[in-house]
């Protein structure tokens, strides 16, 4: 039986304080009356009000949301296919190169990915803007989706699939009616991960975007370079709230489904 | 029928993502390499030669002769690049070790936690990873500034009498990297420790082994795969990091990611930045291949 010593508890508490304190402070100072982000001068929501009059920021937010929605969706389809290819087909020509191309983007420094994609777009004469941005985001997020879905597929009981195939279902039908419902939570969390990564990206976006397609992180970055203001804290707080709610909702739904599935399974066994 | 269907399905599932990654991930590297051999020019795009199908064989051969390794010679001769690569490697190494030192006790504590509490702790480690990287780096500026929150706190409790200068030094970069990459180190170590069989420790202790020795002789060796995976996940991206040195580091801090960015965005020197990227990639190829082998092994074990 593992023992939970005082040392263990202390390291967890300190570790989590380190992880969360900066974010908490950022949120607190977004409600600061003063223009300074380090001196508390009373509660105010004026920075949030100011945001809604900042047209440049709102436009950037809208571009970011559209890019993230499209790229996360395409990346989820491609990433799920890549995961299936890696887990199900252990032998095909060029598999080593394929798995290399799936894992390498996970650790590849963003400056390299960004620069190389930009040079590709220039070489093929693709005008930079919204679509080059979206293509770039699909490319780097699909690998994260692939890894998430892959880990679910590895612990998957293939006999259910084989049963469907034996009973004459086509592979496509088997995939959509048997496999997909089971791996759905992983596919969904892959989508959420791709969405947030895309929402957040600065370096790859800066390289691959063109006129008229400025994303929120690019906007935040250019303002941060001029100085820290409560207005940026307010944007960040909204983004944090958005992501936190998304993640909590996603994990609660996944958990409910899991519980429901276990109940169904138990009911099925009991009824036998 | 089903057999044909399954062959088509198999083809589709492999070919579509494969083709995508070839085109958007691998081919771009070839282009980067090719441009690193060109010369800067005031043109659109800003380098020569530019290949085109209209050149014909002779024209293409002529242009190939114009390619040269001059940019690489330039990188080798200019101390700026040389120093930037070395200092990136140094900063990445130091911050990887610091991350390991901080992450290990957290991962260990999580693995020792009551089983019911573990999913919540896991969720709490992953959650910051979902919030914006840029925001998390930004939040440290207000903390580390000379008149920032950390100095205010330390002055108030009387530990220091003069504000510490942390922002715009290498220490700020270390803090930024450790903070941003901590979850990447905690998760693999935790998953290695969690799988561990506790009866091994009990056996060691029953045989009279003191707890600390038992840790070093039993627990730690078993967690090594997690430690290595975590170190790779921190070290490789940290070498090419741009946002952290740019926002938290000072003007005297050289890191290669920042050099590449400046070369490209401010100096508009595409061939040199392509050469910088090529060399960076060559430096990182060994750790990347190493990381992939670990990843592939983990997949085998998962089956």
Image: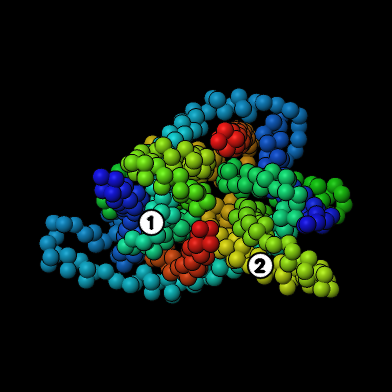
Quarter assignment of residue A91: bottom left
Residue A146 is tagged as none
Residue B222 is tagged as 2
Q: Is residue A13 visible in the rendered structure shown here?
A: yes
- The chain under label 2 reads B
- The chain under label 1 reads A
Secondary-structure class at tag 1 = loop
Residue at x-position 49% and y-position 49%: A157
Q: How is the image coloured?
A: rainbow
Residues under labels 2 and 1: Cα distance? 30 Å
Quarter assignment of residue B187: bottom right
Quarter assignment of residue B224: bottom right
Q: Is residue B95 visible in the rendered structure shown here?
A: no
| Mark 2 nearby-residue class (10 Å; few <14, some 14–19, many ≥20) | some
Secondary-structure class at tag 2 = helix
| Mark 1 nearby-residue class (10 Å; few <14, some 14–19, many ≥20) | few
Position of B68 compared to B191: left or right?
left
Residue A89 is tagged as 1
Identify which residue, A221 or A62, lies in the foreground: A62
Residue at x-position 42% and y-position 61%: A100
Q: Where does the image place residue B31, in percent across and percent down from the top left?
A: 31, 60
Residue at x-position 59% and y-position 26%: A50
Residue at x-position 81% and y-position 69%: B205
């Amino acid at each position: 039986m593992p023992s939970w010593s005082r040392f263990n508890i202390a390291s967890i508490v300190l570790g989590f304080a380190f992880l969360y304190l900066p974010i908490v402070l950022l949120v607190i100072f977004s409600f600061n009356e003063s223009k300074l982000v380090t001196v508390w001068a009373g509660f105010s929501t004026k920075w949030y009000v100011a945001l809604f009059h900042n047209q440049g920021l709102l436009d950037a937010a809208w571009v970011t949301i559209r890019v993230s929605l499209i790229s996360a969706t395409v990346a989820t389809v491609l990433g799920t296919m890549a995961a299936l290819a890696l887990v199900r087909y252990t032998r095909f020509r060029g598999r080593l190169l394929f798995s290399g191309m799936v894992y390498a983007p996970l650790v590849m420094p963003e400056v390299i990915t960004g620069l190389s994609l930009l040079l590709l777009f220039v070489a093929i004469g693709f005008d930079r803007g919204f679509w080059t941005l979206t293509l770039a985001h699909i490319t780097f997020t699909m690998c994260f989706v692939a890894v998430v879905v892959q880990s679910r597929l590895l612990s998957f009981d293939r006999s259910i699939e084989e049963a469907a195939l034996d009973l004459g279902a086509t592979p496509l039908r088997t995939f959509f009616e048997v496999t997909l419902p089971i791996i759905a939570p992983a596919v969904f969390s892959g989508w959420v991960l791709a969405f947030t990564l895309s929402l957040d990206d600065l370096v790859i976006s800066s390289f691959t975007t063109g006129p008229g397609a400025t994303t929120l992180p690019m906007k935040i970055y250019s303002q941060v370079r001029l100085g820290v203001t409560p207005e940026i804290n307010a944007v960040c707080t909204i983004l944090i709230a958005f992501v936190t709610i998304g993640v909590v909702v996603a994990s609660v739904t996944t958990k409910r489904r899991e519980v429901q599935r276990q109940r169904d399974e138990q009911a099925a066994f009991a009824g036998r | 029928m089903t057999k044909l269907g399954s062959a088509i399905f198999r083809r589709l599932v492999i070919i579509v993502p494969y083709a995508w990654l070839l085109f958007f991930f691998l081919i771009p590297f070839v282009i980067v390499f090719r441009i690193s051999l060109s010369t800067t020019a005031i043109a659109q795009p800003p380098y020569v030669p530019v290949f085109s199908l209209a050149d014909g064989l002779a024209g293409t051969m002529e242009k190939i002769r114009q390619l040269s390794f001059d940019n690489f010679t330039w990188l080798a001769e200019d101390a700026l690049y040389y120093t930037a690569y070395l200092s990136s490697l140094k900063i990445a190494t130091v911050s990887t070790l610091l991350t390991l030192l901080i992450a290990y006790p957290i991962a260990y504590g999580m693995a020792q936690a009551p089983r019911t509490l573990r999913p919540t702790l896991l969720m709490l480690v992953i959650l910051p990873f979902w919030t914006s990287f840029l925001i998390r780096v930004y939040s440290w500026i207000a903390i580390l500034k000379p008149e920032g929150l950390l100095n205010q706190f330390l002055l108030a409790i009387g530990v220091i009498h003069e504000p510490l200068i942390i922002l715009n030094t290498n220490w700020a970069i270390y803090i930024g990297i450790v903070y941003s990459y901590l979850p990447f180190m905690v998760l693999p170590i935790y998953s290695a420790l969690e799988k561990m069989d506790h009866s091994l420790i009990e056996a060691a202790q029953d045989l009279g082994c003191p707890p600390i020795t038992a840790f070093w002789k039993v627990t730690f060796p078993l967690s090594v795969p997690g430690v290595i995976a975590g170190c790779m996940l921190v070290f490789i991206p940290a070498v090419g990091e741009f946002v952290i040195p740019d926002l938290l580091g000072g003007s005297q801090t050289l890191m290669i990611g920042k050099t590449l960015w400046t070369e490209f965005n401010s100096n508009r020197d595409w061939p040199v930045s392509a050469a910088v990227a090529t060399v960076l990639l060559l430096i990182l190829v060994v750790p990347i291949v190493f990381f992939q082998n670990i990843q592939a092994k983990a997949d085998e074990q998962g089956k």
